[in-house]
Amino acid sequence: MEVEPVDRINSVTAAPPLHRYISTFCKKMASTEPKPQRAPQWKEGKVLSLKLRDDSWALLQMLKRKGDLAVFSYRSLDNQWSIGQLEKENFLFSCFTTKAVLKRSELALQSGIKGIERIQLPSSKIQAGDGFKKRAYWIGTDDEIEFICFGQESNSIRTERVENGRLCYDYRTIKNEEFDTYRHLELTSLRDYPEFNERIFLSLEAGHNIDPLKELIFDRPAKEEFKTYYKIISGKHRLDYLGY
């Protein structure tokens, strides 16, 4: 049965597309942006390595829908890999990304590594609430930073279902106190360069899936290890000074 374009049913008011704001933040840098390269052709199952800001490398896999990238917990200091197959137990997260991720990241095709045929993902995602909220951390110190982020109003859970051959979304409002219950779900937003890259770096450093943007929209406390991420989305710092 073919799935037709989205119908919105029983929906709460949706937030504006978050990727527009992420892109705006990431492009507002007072710097010379890295010269875009030609993005690799999209093919389901293709495995790529991506260079991180500490010169280590991570592994990604292209999924069925264009822009949907799966991220794994593998890491290499020299982009040399001793594996021939990605394993499900090393899967960290997947999310939709903008074209800038493939155009501006340093990538290498890993034709000798086979991707996973099927990754089972939840049918629900988190949609940030409407509006913006201001964040200010480490006031009065050398690390003081201010920026705005999404989710001024209540966040919601967006669940997919198919009705009469049409893909529909149901929405249910959730509270910030329910973060631990839904932290395993991805956001509905597109992720951009280098915000996406920094998330990979933080996840590999921690050894598990981390999403600073999700923590921000749920009003979680600031974290020292997120400082570079905050600077990226603030639009007030040069990307080349941050390792990008």
Image (cartoon, grey):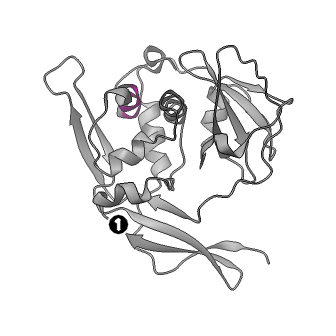
Give the residue drawn at x 39%, y 34%. 233
Quarter holding the N terminus is: bottom right
Secondary structure type for disc 1: loop
Residue that badge 1 annotates:
174
Q: Looking at this rendering, what residue extends furthest in the right direction? A: 112
Q: Position of residue 87 (x, y in %)?
A: 73, 41
Q: Quadrant of residue 106?
A: top right
Q: Position of residue 59 (x, y in %)?
A: 68, 32
| Type of the residue with mark 1 | Ile
Q: Nearer the viewer, residue 180 or 15?
A: 180
Residue 229 part of the magenta-drawn span? yes
Magenta range is 228-233
Residue 221 part of the magenta-drawn span? no
Q: Nearer the viewer, residue 230 or 174?
A: 174
Q: Nearer the viewer, residue 140 or 209?
A: 209
**Would you place residue 3 above or below residue 135 in this image?**
below
Q: Looking at this rendering, what residue extends furthest in the bottom direction? A: 164
**Would you place residue 31 above or below residue 18 in this image?**
above
Count of numbered labels shown in the rendering: 1
Give the residue drawn at x 36%, y 32%. 230
Q: Main secondary structure of the magenta part?
A: helix
Q: Position of residue 126 (x, y in %)?
A: 46, 59
